[in-house]
Every structure is written in structure tokens, then in C-alpha cells.
């Protein structure tokens, strides 16, 4: 008689509890024997296997048998509950550490999820690439492209489609016009590329016709008081083109979601722009568009291979060498655009790595707290565990009990952490200048969070429960002191050391990040940004009257001076011209930034002259013929003093009448560039379109109304202004936010490890209370006792410092390398961080020592 | 106490256990169901139902003698308890009551 397959029997044993095994096996065997008679052995074996495989049922799985016994559950919960409430302090410590840890990780998780969700709503993104203007020689890439970039691509490669859009500030409406900075001329393919939700209108045709306009819901509500404004006609004045259109609203869309890198308030048909800028768009140099292409799968290499020929063909071999295009995958744009010029998105993959790491570290600290405290307290559970063992609980049973306890505790901490986050998220957002919310979390996400918390409970419970289960409570007598730690000392010290290490590195990094931020903010820019008010003048027509406005403003009492410039501050340097000169050997070329100013500019901003003189008049002789350059430009040319010499800028020889000191008119993310200052008459691209007013801040409130009065005399546009020093601080918003984020989570990390330290020290002093009392009686001082207790902590601490110093140095050096202007790393921050951590540990230690030794030694020693 | 409601399959198994009169166990319940109403079910689902009926208190189990046919494993035999009998009676009464209310007309033209 052949037996059924062994593994099938084994499978039955594993999936069926003892209680039901005989019944199941017996029945299956009976059927098996019947099958042998009927079909023969081979088929019978096969049928047996199938039956065995489909035999598992919930009610007889061995694992679930355990959970079905509700008495066991109740008992576990009761023990956990009683234990937690008997030792309120250490339970509170344990829980609060976990709550803070989980809450911090939850918030970091929201941040990372938000960053990763960027642009994912655009469903076509897989096949879309952003076209970058690139220079293969120096590997510089720029987001803005000319009309020709997209056009040449679509002409050469018929299988791709192209979408371009370009910014152009406009004024909308008649009576109460609105300034719309986020207005874009867009190709009709726009809604085919990007999945924005359309409220009204046809996404395929809405940008095809001349004078069509698509606006967002919020703009529509602002203009018309309703979201449904299809087919209404709107007056749109284009500042740069100095032209007015009657545009018909052909579509209304929902506001772009915050996590789309494409943001706008209104789109106009590209046909209008082509008409308006018909000459400019033929030029490869007129870069004002962002270009995206949609490429069928796998055909991008083909395009890349054909690019050099295409560029050489269109631009000539010489220009074709330094001008090319690069393609960036659409979903990479938000997080992987570092180093690409004029890329507006603020995301950075490195941020995610940094915060992911901080989150993991915080989680690690709170877990190791829990592990340390639970194992340290194992002694208190000694009696319970012994009784269980005597009554026949196996090792596995004890492990299971403690894991369940830890899962329950972590679960409570998780719920509390999520509640804590829900309550504090608005404040955290406000403080960290983020806009995160948990509303968008799907049920799947919540399930993931729930499962992670359970997994966390199992992981945290595993180590202590194993070490508790391993204890042999009868081998060495029954005194609790002997089982004071379940983990061996080395493991415990390692956990402690890691905590110290993480805290040290985080504190030092937070200090350095903050130092770098304030260094940038308080950097001596080389000119005076204080008391400077900046008014942008977008209207071309108004720019012609700039001098009149300037004169009127200068009359106002409280105004110290007025000047005009083509660059706001901090500058973007939108106009770069060629610079040619001949030194003793050859003709040389470089680039120089062009800034249009007037003669008041240098005095008002406090920029000093190195040599030469200022412009003398506003127009006549100085206009465009004479130039003032900065030191950097003089150094690049390298011919010594240039005052009075002629250099060729933008294809014309110009007389250098003065050289000014180098100053940082851009944010400190970039180095000082060579600059040429000119006086230009109104009407060119580099003519002044900004007013700078130096005023007495005390009179500010009255002055603004006076300024507005004058402004209203010239235009119906609303007056907008800002202050230059604030604008410069705003340029470091990213650093500020980063510094805040790092310091915020560092504080959380410190609090958690402090909580852990507190618990651990409290436990150590408690377990050594007799030793301490005897020492005390024999005349030990506080300091002696501190030494006895503190040695363990201090030795671990110094090991941590030895590792933390090079680690911090390495990490921070890498981070600082991103800045053109940065602080010098030296030991002082590390030292400060070490001192902070050390003194906190010592204070905690001292506190516990005081608490312990204040008890009467006689009483301590008499209780057993 | 769990609900004493009987599902369709539970009712069927309970009836078979009654029919087999104290000798019911997994395999012969399965065979009987096949024989009487020609319905094929797996032995494991019989087990599930038997255990559920036992938990509800309609049947009880006891260990039968070990037999060599079953590889030396003893049978777990089931017999119906008075609660089970009552439950079956009740269902039957309810059904008959409902049958009486059913208008004849629906059969003539159905």
C-alpha cells in the first residue's frame, strides 16, 4: 500500500491544529484509499495533494487557534495595562518618545509623498520631455528656449508634437484692471500635453483661434464673480508688446494643482504672440518660451543622434557647436532640475534624501529608547514571567506576549501621533512654510500607515521579548537586581552610543545650516539695500514717462532720492551681450551683463567708484555711448585701468568713463558677473522699467499714499511695490526653510533621546540604589557618586564624539559645496554641539542622583 | 452564544447528520450528500460546517474507534442533539406555513 506524498502530510500538519488533525487526516486517507481502488495510485496521490492544498480553513489554522482564545487576549491586555499603570513614569517616557517619533516620521512622510506626487496628475508625462537650450561645450543648460527650438524640432521630426508657452505680463479688464503676471501664450497642444481639469470649453480647440483666452476658475471668479464665463470678451493689454486685444474666453479650467510645476492664471493663443512678436520669434536668440515635446516610445535616441546635424544646418557650423538642445524627462523636472538655469521649481531630490534620513534616524532613536527601556525593566516582569513559565508557557508564548504588548503600545502611540499631527499640522505648516495636508491620503495610504505601525510594534517588541524569554529566572536565585538588563551590556551601550551619535550630528548640522543661512542673510553685499523701495513699471507706455514720474516723486518730503533701472534687485540679469576686446595677442570675446540705469543710481545704492566718474546727464552725450563697468569686467579684460579706453560691447565701441566696485546685485547663490551700466532712452529691451526710491522709513505710512497719488496721475494700473532688503532675504527662502526644517526635527530628535536618556538613567540609579546608599554612608560626595553612575554614559559618549566629528564634517562639507559664498567649517560648531549634549546628560544624571540619594539610606538598605 | 440561524448548506448537513443517526463523519456526509441530492462538495468544507454546527450546539462529536483503513486515525463521529432536532422542526414548520400561503394560481400558469 503506497503512502500519500510526505510533503502533503507535512503541509497538513502545519496548517491544521492538533485538535482537528486526526479528523482531517483520517478523512483524507479514507478518500485516498478509495481513490486507489478506483483510479490507481498515481491519480490518487494527485487527488490527495489537491485536497490537502485546499484543506486550510481559518478556524483550524494553528496560528489562529491562539487568537481565538479570548481569555489569553484579555489576559495579555490586562497585564500590559496593569504594568503600564504601575510604572506610570517609564510608560509615559516610553510612549511619549514613540508618539513624537511616529508623528515626526508621519510629517516627513507627508512631505516626501507631496514631493514625489509632483506632476503625476499629468497623465501623458511618460512621453513628454522638456527641451533645454544647452551648450555642449560648457555643459550649461537653460529652461528658456526660443520659438525656433520647438519649430525646428517639429519640422525635422514629424512624429513628435510640440507644446510651447511663454510668460508675458498683462493687464486684464477695463474699469478695475488686474495685473496678471502669470499669463502665458501657449500652443494649442497645451491641453493635449497637460491634464488640467476643464470646467468649460473644449480642450482640443480652445487655444487654436486668434484671440482665444483660457482662464482659471479663481481668475474667472475674480473678474466676473462666477466660474462660468465662457464666451465673454475681455480687454487684455500686453505690456511688452504694448498692444491691446479683445480676447474671447474659450475655456475655464480648475486652478492648477499646487503640485504641478506648471502654474498659470491665464493662457492666450500662441497665434496672438506670433503676430505680436513676428520679427523676434524668427531669432534663435530670443529666448522666452518653455518648450515640451511628446515623443512616441523609444524614439528619443533617434532625435538626439540627429541633433548636431540639425543645429549645424540651422545655425551654421560655428554656432551649432555651442548651441544644442537637451531633453529632460517630464517627471524628473520637479526633483532633478538642479544646475539648470532659470528652472523655477523648488524641489530637490537631495532634500528628500536628507529628510528621509532624518526621519529614519528619529524613528531609530525612538525604537532604541523603547528597546532599551523595556529590556532594562525586564526585572520588574520577572515574577510574572516566572509564573507563566512554571505554568507551562513556552518561550514562544512569552515572546508572543511581549510582542503583542509592544504592538498594542505602538498602536496607541501611533493613534496618538496621528491625532497630534492632525492637531498641530497647521501650525507646523505655518512655521516650516510648507503646505502639507493629510486630507489627500487615500484609504490605501491609511492602510499602509496602519500596517507600518503594526510592523513597527513587532520590530520593536522582538528584541526585548526574545531577551526576556531567554532569561532563566531560577538559575541564580531570585533577586531582581541580577536580571537588571536582558540585553547584554555591549548591545545596550551600542544603542546608547548610536543615540548620542545621531543627536550630536543633528545638533551640529542644525547649527551649521543656521550659520550658513544667517551668513547669507547678513552678507555685506557691497551696496546699501536699506530704505530702498522698488516699484516695477510694466507698461511700455508708462516707461516713456519715467523721467517725469521720477521728478515728481523726488519733490516729496521724506524721499531722499529716486532712480530708475532695468534690473530689479536682486537682479536676474536678463540681458547678456557680447564683449570683445583685443589684447596684445589676439581678439578675445566674452559675455557681459547689461544694466540700464540713470545718473542717480550709484549714489542711491551706495556703490562706490574705483576710478573715473559717474554719468553726467540723463540723455545727450552719455546716452549709450559711454559705459560704466564693474571691477569684475575690468579684471576679465585684464588690461589694467580701463578708464578712458574704448571697449566693444554688443558690437559697438564704447568709452569706459568709470569703474565701480564689485557688488552682489544678485543673490549669493551665484558669483559676481561682469556688468556694464548704460543710460538707454526709453523703448528698448534694456531701458529702465523699475523705479527705486530711497526714503525715510519713519515716514513710510504717509509716503505710500503720497506716492500712490502721483502714480495715479499717470496710469490706471494698480501700484505695486516691495523693499529691496526684504527681497534679498526672500531670495534665501529656501535656505531659511531648510534651516527651519532641520532645526525643527533636530529638536524633536533631541527631545526623544533626552526622554530615553532620562528613562535609562532613572533605571540605572534605581537598580544601583543600594550600592549608592552604602557609598553614601561611607562618606562619598556627590561628585564621587556622579563618577560611579556617569562613567558608563561618559565612555559611550566619547566614542560617539570620535565618530560624530568626521561624519558631520564630511556631510556638511558636501552640503556647503553648493554655495558660492559659504562659511568656513571649523570645530566650534561641533564643540558647541558636544557641550550641549554633554551638559544635558549630566543635568539629567545629577537630577536622578539627587532624587535617589535624598532617600534615607537606612530605609533603602532595610527593604529587600 | 452565536446566532442560531441556519444557512442553506448548514441545514443540509444537519439533516444528513440526522439521517446517518450517530455514525456521521466527514467522508460519509460527503458521500450521502452526493448520493441523495447529487451535489459534489469537498471534505474540508464539510468539516467547516460540522465544526460550526457543533459550536452552535446543534450537534455533538465523540471519538469513534480507530480503523486501519484510515491509516490508524480515529474517526470523529457526529450525532444530532435535541437542539438540532428542534431547529430542524422549526424550519420545517416555517416552510410549511409559507407553502400554505403560496397561491395555487402561480403554478397553473407558471
Image (cartoon, rainbow, N blue to C red):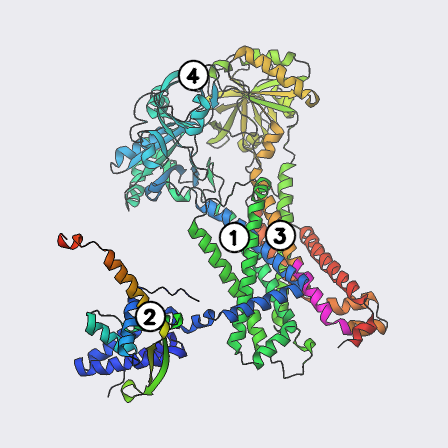
- The chain that hosts pointer 4 is A
Q: Which residue is mark 3?
A: A748
Residue density around tag 4, few if under 14, some if 14–19, many if 20 or more, within 10 Å: few
Extent of the magenta region: A755-770
Does the magenta-highlighted stretch encompass residue B75?
no
Residue highlighted by disc 2 = B49
* Nearer the camera: disc 2 or disc 3: 2
Residue A820 visible in rendering = no
Res. A823 image quadrant: top right
User: Would you name the residue on which mark 4 appears?
Assistant: A242
Q: Position of residue A159 (x, y in %)?
A: 25, 38
Q: Which residue is mark 1?
A: A356
Query: What is the spatial separation of the Cα atoms under label 3 and label 4, in whole angstroms?
Result: 55 Å
Mark closest to the chain's N terminus, 3 or 4: 4
Q: Does residue A702 appear left or right of residue A33 in this picture?
A: right
Q: Quadrant of the N terminus of chain A?
A: bottom left
**Residue A733: image x %, image y %?**
57, 38
Amino acid at each position: 500500500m503506497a503512502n500519500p506524498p510526505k510533503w502533503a502530510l507535512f503541509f497538513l500538519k502545519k496548517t491544521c491544529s492538533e485538535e482537528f488533525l486526526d479528523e482531517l487526516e483520517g478523512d483524507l486517507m479514507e478518500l485516498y484509499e478509495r481513490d486507489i481502488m478506483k483510479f490507481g495510485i498515481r491519480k490518487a496521490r494527485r487527488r490527495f495533494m489537491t485536497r490537502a492544498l485546499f484543506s486550510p480553513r481559518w478556524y483550524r489554522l494553528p496560528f489562529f487557534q491562539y487568537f481565538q482564545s479570548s481569555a489569553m487576549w484579555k489576559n495579555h491586555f490586562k497585564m500590559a495595562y496593569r504594568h503600564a499603570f504601575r510604572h506610570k513614569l517609564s510608560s509615559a517616557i516610553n510612549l511619549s518618545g514613540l508618539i513624537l517619533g511616529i508623528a515626526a516620521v508621519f510629517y516627513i512622510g507627508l512631505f516626501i509623498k507631496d514631493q514625489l506626487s509632483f506632476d503625476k496628475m499629468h497623465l501623458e508625462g511618460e512621453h513628454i520631455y522638456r527641451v533645454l537650450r544647452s551648450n555642449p561645450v560648457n555643459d550649461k543648460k537653460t529652461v528658456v528656449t526660443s520659438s525656433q527650438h520647438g519649430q525646428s524640432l517639429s519640422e525635422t521630426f514629424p512624429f513628435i508634437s510640440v507644446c510651447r508657452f511663454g510668460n508675458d505680463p498683462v493687464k486684464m479688464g477695463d474699469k478695475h484692471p488686474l495685473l496678471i503676471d502669470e499669463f502665458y501664450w501657449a500652443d494649442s497642444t497645451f491641453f493635449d500635453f497637460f491634464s488640467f481639469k476643464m470646467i468649460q470649453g473644449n480642450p482640443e480647440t480652445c487655444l487654436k483661434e486668434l484671440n482665444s483666452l483660457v482662464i482659471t476658475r479663481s481668475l474667472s471668479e475674480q473678474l466676473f464673480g462666477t466660474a462660468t464665463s465662457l464666451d465673454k470678451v475681455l480687454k487684455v493689454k500686453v505690456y511688452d508688446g504694448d498692444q491691446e486685444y479683445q480676447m474671447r474666453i474659450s475655456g475655464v479650467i480648475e486652478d492648477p494643482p499646487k503640485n504641478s510645476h506648471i502654474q498659470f492664471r491665464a493662457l492666450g493663443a500662441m497665434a496672438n504672440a506670433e503676430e505680436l512678436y513676428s520679427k523676434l520669434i524668427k531669432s534663435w536668440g530670443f529666448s522666452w518660451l518653455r518648450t515640451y515635446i511628446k515623443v512616441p516610445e523609444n524614439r528619443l535616441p533617434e532625435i538626439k543622434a540627429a541633433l548636431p546635424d540639425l543645429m549645424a544646418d540651422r545655425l551654421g557650423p560655428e554656432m551649432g557647436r555651442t548651441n544644442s538642445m537637451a531633453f529632460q524627462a517630464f517627471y524628473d523636472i520637479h526633483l532633478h532640475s538642479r544646475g539648470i538655469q532659470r528652472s523655477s521649481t523648488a524641489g530637490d531630490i537631495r532634500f528628500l534624501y536628507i529628510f528621509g534620513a532624518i526621519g529614519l534616524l528619529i524613528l531609530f532613536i525612538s525604537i532604541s529608547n523603547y528597546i532599551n527601556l523595556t529590556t532594562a525593566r525586564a526585572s520588574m516582569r520577572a515574577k510574572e514571567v516566572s509564573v507563566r513559565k512554571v505554568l507551562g508557557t513556552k518561550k514562544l508564548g512569552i515572546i508572543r506576549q511581549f510582542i503583542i504588548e509592544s504592538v498594542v503600545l505602538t498602536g496607541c502611540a501611533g493613534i496618538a501621533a496621528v491625532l497630534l499631527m492632525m492637531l498641530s499640522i497647521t501650525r507646523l505648516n505655518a512655521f516650516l512654510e510648507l503646505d502639507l495636508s493629510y486630507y489627500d491620503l487615500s484609504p490605501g495610504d491609511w492602510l499602509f500607515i496602519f500596517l507600518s505601525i503594526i510592523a513597527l510594534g513587532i520590530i520593536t517588541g522582538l528584541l526585548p521579548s526574545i531577551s526576556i524569554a531567554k532569561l532563566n529566572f531560577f538559575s541564580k536565585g531570585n533577586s531582581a537586581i541580577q536580571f537588571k538588563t536582558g540585553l547584554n551590556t555591549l548591545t545596550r551601550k551600542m544603542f546608547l552610543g548610536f543615540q548620542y551619535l545621531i543627536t550630536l550630528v543633528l545638533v551640529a548640522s542644525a547649527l551649521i545650516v543656521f550659520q550658513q543661512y544667517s551668513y547669507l542673510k547678513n552678507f555685506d553685499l557691497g551696496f546699501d539695500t536699506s530704505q530702498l523701495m522698488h516699484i516695477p513699471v510694466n507698461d511700455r507706455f508708462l516707461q516713456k514717462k519715467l523721467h517725469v514720474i521720477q521728478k515728481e516723486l523726488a519733490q516729496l518730503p521724506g524721499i531722499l532720492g529716486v532712480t530708475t533701472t532695468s534690473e530689479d534687485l536682486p537682479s536676474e540679469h536678463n540681458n547678456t551681450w557680447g564683449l570683445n576686446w583685443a589684447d596684445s595677442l589676439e581678439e578675445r570675446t566674452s559675455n557681459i551683463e547689461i544694466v540700464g540705469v540713470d545718473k542717480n543710481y550709484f549714489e542711491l545704492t551706495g556703490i562706490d567708484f574705483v576710478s573715473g566718474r559717474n554719468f553726467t546727464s540723463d540723455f545727450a552725450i552719455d546716452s549709450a555711448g559711454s559705459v560704466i563697468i564693474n571691477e569684475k569686467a575690468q579684471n576679465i579684460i585684464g588690461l589694467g585701468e580701463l578708464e578712458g579706453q574704448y571697449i566693444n560691447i554688443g558690437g559697438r565701441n564704447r568709452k569706459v568713463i568709470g569703474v565701480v566696485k564689485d557688488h552682489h546685485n544678485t543673490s549669493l547663490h551665484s558669483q559676481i558677473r561682469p556688468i556694464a551700466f548704460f543710460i538707454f532712452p526709453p523703448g528698448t529691451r534694456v531701458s529702465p522699467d523699475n523705479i527705486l526710491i530711497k526714503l525715510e522709513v519713519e515716514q513710510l505710512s504717509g509716503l505710500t499714499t503720497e506716492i500712490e497719488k502721483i502714480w495715479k496721475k499717470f496710469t490706471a494700473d494698480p501700484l505695486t511695490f516691495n523693499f529691496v532688503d526684504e527681497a534679498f532675504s526672500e531670495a534665501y527662502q529656501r535656505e531659511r526653510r531648510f534651516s527651519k526644517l532641520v532645526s525643527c526635527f533636530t529638536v524633536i530628535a533631541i527631545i526623544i533621546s533626552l526622554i530615553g536618556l532620562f528613562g535609562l538613567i532613572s533605571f540605572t540609579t534605581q537598580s544601583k540604589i543600594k550600592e549608592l546608599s552604602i557609598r553614601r554612608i561611607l562618606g562619598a560626595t556627590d561628585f564621587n557618586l556622579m563618577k560611579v553612575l556617569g562613567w558608563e554614559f561618559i565612555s559611550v559618549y566619547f566614542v560617539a564624539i570620535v565618530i560624530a566629528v568626521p561624519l558631520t564634517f564630511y556631510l556638511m562639507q558636501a552640503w556647503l559645496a553648493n554655495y558660492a559664498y559659504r562659511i568656513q567649517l571649523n570645530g566650534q560648531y561641533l564643540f558647541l554641539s558636544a557641550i550641549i549634549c554633554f551638559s544635558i546628560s549630566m543635568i539629567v544624571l545629577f537630577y536622578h542622583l539627587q532624587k535617589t540619594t535624598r532617600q534615607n539610606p537606612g530605609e533603602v538598605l532595610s527593604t529587600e | 452564544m452565536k446566532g442560531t440561524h441556519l444557512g442553506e448548506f448548514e441545514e443540509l448537513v444537519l439533516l444528513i447528520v440526522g439521517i446517518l443517526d450517530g455514525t456521521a463523519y466527514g467522508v460519509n456526509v460527503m458521500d450521502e450528500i452526493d448520493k441523495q441530492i447529487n451535489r459534489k462538495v469537498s471534505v474540508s468544507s464539510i468539516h467547516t460546517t460540522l465544526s460550526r454546527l457543533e459550536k452552535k450546539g446543534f450537534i455533538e462529536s465523540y471519538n469513534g474507534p480507530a480503523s486501519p483503513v484510515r491509516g490508524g486515525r480515529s474517526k470523529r463521529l457526529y450525532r444530532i442533539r435535541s437542539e438540532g432536532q428542534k431547529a430542524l422542526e422549526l424550519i420545517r414548520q416555517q416552510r410549511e406555513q409559507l407553502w400554505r400561503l403560496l397561491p395555487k394560481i402561480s403554478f397553473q400558469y407558471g
